[in-house]
């Protein structure tokens, strides 16, 4: 059974870059059957799709975040990553990684504050 | 980009009631629609994909229907364990936009 685990700093200063990694176990990230996504959820609010990557390296991003996002994959470590630049308090949220639609990580809270 | 609008944003119903949640796409998305359930403090769980296909293990009292722009999630007989927020998501093409969510409570 596949498992996904988000990791990264829980606190990021305004204007800095948020960096998160999703480590995949129980499946190879080289599995071309899936895309690998990032989704976030501010406290008390709804889900926001951030973007996805295919093993080919092809990416799709949320247009509202596109200028600040980079999603990449590291097949040697069976991981994929999210970088979100120039963060503000509005980027404070629980960040989830996911394989396709069905398999999600537990989420990690990232707070943007000085 | 295609917008996804859910209604109502919240509802309160009695145990045993039939509950219907609507999701409308601003343009046609065929049947590329998924429904998720998120209980408080928990990770979203995929319930339905392809608008009407129940994910394995999901109770049969939940069902989905629709195609094109209008979709519904129905709970045929509301149970206490169905208290949650429900989200639709389009996946015909990026961006994979979520609806705003519908919070379901027990009256």
Image (cartoon, rainbow, N blue to C red):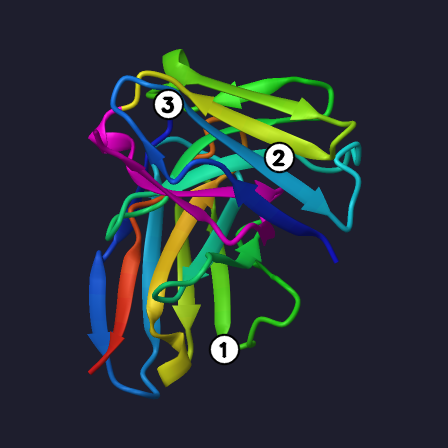
Image quarter of residue B107? bottom left
Question: Where are the magenta residues, as a range?
Answer: A88-114
Determine the chain carrying the residue at label 2.
A
**Judging from the image, what secondary structure is the residue with disc 2 in?**
strand
Residues tagged by mark 1 and mark 3 found on one chain of the structure: yes
- The spot of residue A70 in percent (x, y) is 50, 18
Determine the chain carrying the residue at label 3.
B
Question: Which residue shows up at 56% across the image and 50% down it?
Answer: A104
Residues tagged by mark 1 and mark 2 found on one chain of the structure: no
Image quarter of residue B55? bottom right
**Judging from the image, what secondary structure is the residue with disc 1 in?**
loop
Residue linked to disc 1: B61
Q: Camera-side residue: B71 or B3?
A: B3
**Cα distance between the residues tagged 1 and 2:** 30 Å
- Classify residue B67 as left or right of residue A77: left
**Cα distance between the residues tagged 3 and 2:** 21 Å
**Judging from the image, what secondary structure is the residue with disc 3 in?**
loop
Q: Camera-side residue: B14 or B80?
A: B80
Viewer can see residue B106: yes
Image quarter of residue A76? top right
The tag on residue A36 is: 2
Question: Which residue shows up at 35% across the image and 68% down it?
Answer: B84
Nearest to viewer (mark 1 / mark 2): 2
**Cα distance between the residues tagged 1 and 3:** 33 Å
């Amino acid at each position: 059974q596949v498992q996904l685990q988000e990791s990264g700093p829980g606190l990021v200063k305004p204007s800095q870059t948020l960096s998160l990694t999703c480590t995949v176990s129980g499946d190879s990230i080289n599995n071309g059957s899936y895309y690998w996504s990032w989704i976030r959820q501010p406290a008390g609010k709804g889900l926001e799709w951030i973007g996805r990557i295919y093993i080919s390296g092809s990416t799709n991003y949320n247009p509202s975040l596109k200028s600040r996002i980079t999603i990449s994959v590291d097949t040697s470590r069976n991981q994929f990553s999210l970088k979100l630049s120039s963060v503000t308090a509005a980027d404070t949220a629980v960040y989830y990684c996911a394989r396709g639609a069905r398999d999600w990580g537990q989420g990690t809270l990232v707070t943007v504050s000085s | 980009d295609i917008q996804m609008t859910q209604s109502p944003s919240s509802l309160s119903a009695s145990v045993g009631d039939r509950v219907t949640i609507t999701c409308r796409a601003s343009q046609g998305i065929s049947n590329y629609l998924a429904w998720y359930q998120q209980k408080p403090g928990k990770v979203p769980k995929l319930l339905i994909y392809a608008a009407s296909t129940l994910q394995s293990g999901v109770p049969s009292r939940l069902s989905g229907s629709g195609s094109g722009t209008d979709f519904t999630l129905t709970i045929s007989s509301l149970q206490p364990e169905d208290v949650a927020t429900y989200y639709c998501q389009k996946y015909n093409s990026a961006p994979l936009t979520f609806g705003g969510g519908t919070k379901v409570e027990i009256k």
